[in-house]
Amino acid sequence: MNNPLAMLTDQFLKERTYLKNVTPATLVWYRVAFKSYRASFANDTAPLPTKAALRDFVVKQREHGLRAVTVNTYIGAMNAFCVWLFTEGHIAERVKLSKLRVEMRMLSVVPAKKSIWSPIRAFSSRWKDLARRQVAVAVGAR
């Protein structure tokens, strides 16, 4: 493993695992972001993150068709890595990339219609009321 970026990402993941106690899902999130960052540069020669390198990374991800929400998750992981690099002294200046603006997606709301299931809902709500009363009595009896 002669690649300094690969060694630093491994060290970052170890520290996050044992010192920050992050979840396995968070480690997967970091690994996916790092893999995507490395893949966006030719011949696995990804440089240490700089502002320009991160901007190139974002542009390449968007050119590949990734949505802004997905790229924002990668930006978050890379920002955390850059803060760690700065605090550990591996880079001279703190690098932080702002997240992309995400378009708001509106869901259409269809008005509820009266259906044949209304009596069944009323029946199930009576059962729920009965269950609530029984729980209240059971808790109060202690």
Image: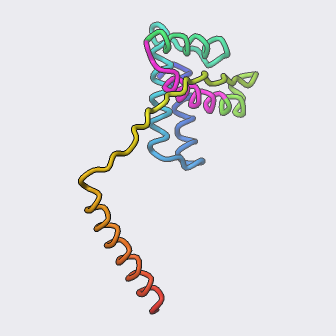
Given the current orientation, which residue lies at the most extreme right position? 93
Q: Is residue 53 left or right of residue 95?
A: left
In the displayed structure, 115 sits above or below 8; it is below
Residue 75 lies in the magenta-colored region: yes
From the viewer's perspective, tell me whether residue 72 is left or right of residue 142.
Answer: right
| Residue sitting at x 69%, y 33% | 88
Q: Nearer the viewer, residue 100 or 58?
A: 100
Coordinates of residue 29 in the picture (x, y in percent) = 47, 34
Residue placed farthest to the bottom in the image? 141
Single out the residue that lies furthest toward the left: 116
Residue 1 position in % (x across, y down): 47, 23
Please state if 136 lies on the left or on the right of 96 as rendered: left
Q: Is the magenta stretch mostly helix, strand or loop?
A: helix
> How was this image coloured?
rainbow
Compared to 25, does 51 lie above or below? above
Residue at 27% in and 62% down = 119
Q: Which of 1 and 61 is in front in this view?
A: 61
Q: Does residue 7 appear anywhere in the picture?
A: no
Going by the picture, which residue comes out furthest to the top?
A: 42
Q: Where are the magenta residues, as a range?
A: 65-82
Residue 117 position (above or below residue 130)? above
Residue closest to the eye, 11 or 136: 136
Residue 38 is at least partly visible in this image:
yes
Q: Residue at x 30, y 61 (%)?
A: 121
Q: Does the magenta stretch include residue 67?
A: yes
Q: How many numbered marks have been drawn onto this rendered protein structure? A: 0
